[in-house]
Amino acid sequence: MARGMRLRRRKRRRKQAAECPLNTEELGRKTWAFLHTMAAYYPEQPSLSQQQDMAQFFNLLSKFYPCATCAANLRSNLSTKKPDTSSRQNLCQWLCELHNQVNKMLGKHPFKCSQVDERWRDGCKGRSSR
Ligand code: FAD
């Protein structure tokens, strides 16, 4: 088969896969990206109402996250370690530890929480979401 035709087929298959519903891994990857980015831009000094809203956000996420096992694990994790919404830095660190708990459960390496700002806010110049 001609190389050009093979490449076109591969590209078509990739495009079809990209337009399928998310599996657990894809959903997880995209959700973590959103959560860490949201934490990265949370106020340095949030008001009391912002702190309560953010805690409530994680509480609701654990009820509606569209992977039943993941949601149950999240509820269990939240019951032992409540979201620290007192500042941007504290929220980022709390979320990093939460993600590491899931990493550990799945047998993955822990992420260095000291690098969370570089990964989700400051790294790769010109790639900020703001
Ligand atoms: P991911 O774990 O998705 O991570 C994406 C990127 O985030 C990494 O490439 C890395 O750059 C960065 N990163 C990794 N760790 C951290 C950290 N600690 N802090 C900051 N950044 C980090 N899957 C299950 O099978 N069972 C579950 O119970 C389950 N629970 C989940 C609960 C939640 C709330 C979410 C959002 C996802 C859950 N998942 C669960 C999915 C799982 O965590 C992964 O998203 C999925 O397995 C894909 O993993 P990955 O190796 O591609 O990277």
Image (spheres, grey):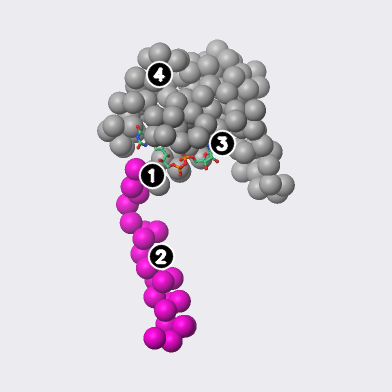
Closer to the N terminus: mark 1 or mark 3? 1
Closer to the N terminus: mark 2 or mark 1? 2
Crowding at mark 3 (Cα within 10 Å: few <14, some 14-19, many 20+): some
Identify the residue shown where x is 53% and y is 28%. Answer: 96
Q: Residue furthest right?
A: 125
Task: Please tell me in which quadrant of the rendered image residue 47 appears.
Answer: top right
Residue to which mark 3 is pinned: 37
Query: In the image, 120: left or right of 3?
Result: right
**Magenta span contains residue 7:** yes
State whether residue 60 appears in this view. Answer: no
Amino acid type assigned to the residue bearing label 2 in the image: Arg
Identify the residue shown where x is 36% and y is 60%. Answer: 17
Residue stretch rendered in magenta on the structure? 1-25
Instruction: Return the mark for residue 78.
Output: 4
Closer to the N terminus: mark 2 or mark 4? 2
Magenta highlight: main SS:
helix
Q: Is mark 1 within 8 Å of ligand 1?
A: yes
> Mark 2 and 3 residues: CB-CB less than 8 Å, in contact?
no
Q: CA distance from mark 4 to mark 1?
A: 21 Å
Q: Is mark 4 within 8 Å of ligand 1?
A: no
Across and down, in percent, residue 60 comes to 37, 25
Name the quarter where the C terminus is drawn.
Answer: top right
Which is in the foreground here, disc 3 or disc 4?
A: 4
Instruction: Return the mark for residue 25.
Output: 1
Which is in the foreground here, disc 4 or disc 1?
A: 1
Instruction: Return the mark for residue 14.
Output: 2
Counting every numbered tag in the picture gives: 4
Closer to the N terminus: mark 3 or mark 4? 3
Crowding at mark 1 (Cα within 10 Å: few <14, some 14-19, many 20+): few
Crowding at mark 4 (Cα within 10 Å: few <14, some 14-19, many 20+): some
